[in-house]
Image (cartoon, rainbow, N blue to C red):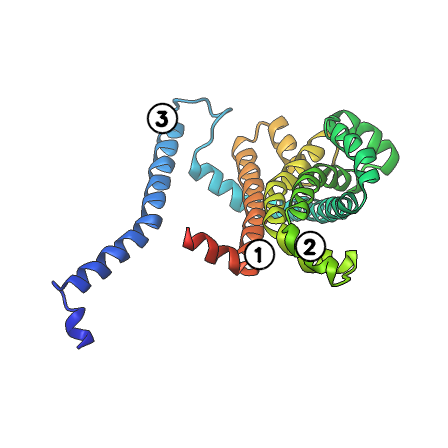
């Protein structure tokens, strides 16, 4: 009976075919657009419509990726290590400070304005001072990455922790629950969407911060390679390093999105009901 229902020409078959086309179209159309863009890019580069000192074709960039693969991978590992360490430190610090703010109005009123003011500090300007203090190793880059990822987590975590249902908190209070129990059982679960928003905001920013720090003062990392290739007028290699940096940034962002998808199934159910 099922075979008859899904036979060609039946309404069920046409519905299944329509659904399959709808799903495949989501993949095929972006891929087709990307192929067209790469073809046009290659044509522009080969035709000399743009100076080779500015634009390299996809084929030249692919060849540079192959020839420079060891250097690109080694320096990408350094940049990612700095970004991920700073990402972890900055987000953990932001969450801890947000928890303190929720439980202490005095701390919030005293420190929060200073924290917001510190966000306006141009870290590029203070990098030479950090190098004098911490040396020219990974430490200044990690500090800058942690500094820039701290503020999105602080703001979002504070909002998320305060968004917990007041009636549930009152119920736990009547049951003589401690502040720690209320934090674990009510506030943190309520703040999960806000926490992942902060993580997604700082995911790409952590890699960018690491790159910027390497541009200014470093002898390793993708940022250093980009400056080196630019000064040597190795344009295909420069584009290859930039693409690898973009891929690293997207990989960190994709890891956060995947973690959100796996760890928050109730959010998917809620969104599907809308």
Q: Where is residue 101 drawn, in percent x and y?
A: 77, 43
State the separation of the CA atoms marked 1 and 3: 44 Å
Q: Which residue is mark 3?
A: 47
Q: Mark 1 touching mark 3, by CB under 8 A? A: no
Q: Nearer the viewer, mark 2 or mark 1?
A: 2
* Mark 3 neighbour class, 10 Å CA radius: few under 14, some 14 to 19, many 20 or more: few
> What residue did someone put label 2 on?
169
For the residues labelled 2 and 1, say whether their Cβ atoms are less than 8 Å apart.
no
Question: Image check: 121 left or right of 77?
Answer: right
Secondary structure of the residue carrying numbered label 1 = helix
Check the picture and name the quadrant holding the N terminus. Answer: bottom left
* Near-viewer residue (48 or 92): 92
The crowding category of the residue bearing disc 1, from other C-alpha atoms within 10 Å (few below 14, some 14 to 19, many at least 20), is few
Distance from disc 2 to disc 1, alpha carbons, whole Å, reads 28 Å
Q: Which one is in front, 159 or 46? A: 159
Pointer 1: what residue?
259
Which residue is the extreme one toward the right? 133
Give x and y (percent) for residue 122.
Answer: 73, 26
Dot 2 or dot 3: first in sequence order is 3
Task: Give SS at disc 2.
Answer: helix
- Give percent across and percent down for residue 97: 77, 44
Q: Quadrant of residue 147?
A: top right
Q: Residues within 10 Å of mark 2 (few under 14, many from 20)?
A: some
Q: Residue furthest bottom?
A: 1
Q: Is residue 44 above or below residue 271?
A: above
The residues tagged by marks 2 and 3 sit, at their Cα atoms, a distance apart of: 67 Å
| Residue at the image position 61 percent from the left and 46 percent from the top | 194
């Amino acid at each position: 009976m099922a075979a008859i229902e899904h036979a060609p020409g039946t309404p069920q078959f046409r519905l299944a075919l329509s659904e399959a086309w709808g799903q495949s179209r989501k993949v095929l159309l972006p891929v087709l657009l990307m192929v067209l863009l790469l073809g046009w890019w290659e044509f522009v580069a080969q035709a000399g419509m743009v100076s080779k000192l500015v634009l390299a074709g996809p084929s030249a960039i692919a060849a540079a990726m192959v020839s420079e693969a060891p250097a690109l991978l080694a320096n990408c590992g350094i940049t990612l290590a700095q970004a991920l360490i700073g990402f972890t430190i900055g987000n953990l610090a932001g969450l801890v400070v947000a928890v303190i703010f929720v439980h202490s109005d005095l701390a919030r009123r005293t420190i929060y304005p200073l924290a917001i003011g510190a966000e306006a500090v141009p870290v590029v300007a203070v990098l030479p001072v950090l190098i004098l203090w911490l040396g020219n190793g990974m430490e200044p880059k990690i500090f800058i990455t942690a500094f820039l990822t701290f503020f999105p987590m602080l703001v979002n975590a504070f909002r998320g922790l305060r968004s917990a249902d007041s009636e549930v908190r009152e119920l736990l209070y009547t049951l003589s629950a401690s502040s720690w129990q209320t934090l674990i059982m009510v506030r943190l679960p309520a703040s999960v969407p806000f926490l992942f928003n902060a993580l997604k905001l700082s995911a790409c920013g952590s890699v960018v911060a690491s790159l910027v720090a390497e541009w200014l003062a470093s002898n390793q990392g993708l940022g250093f390679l980009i400056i080196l290739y630019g000064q040597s007028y190795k344009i295909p290699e420069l584009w290859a390093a930039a693409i690898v940096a973009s891929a690293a940034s997207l990989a960190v962002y994709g890891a956060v999105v995947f973690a959100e998808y796996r760890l928050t199934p109730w959010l998917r159910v809620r969104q599907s009901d809308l």
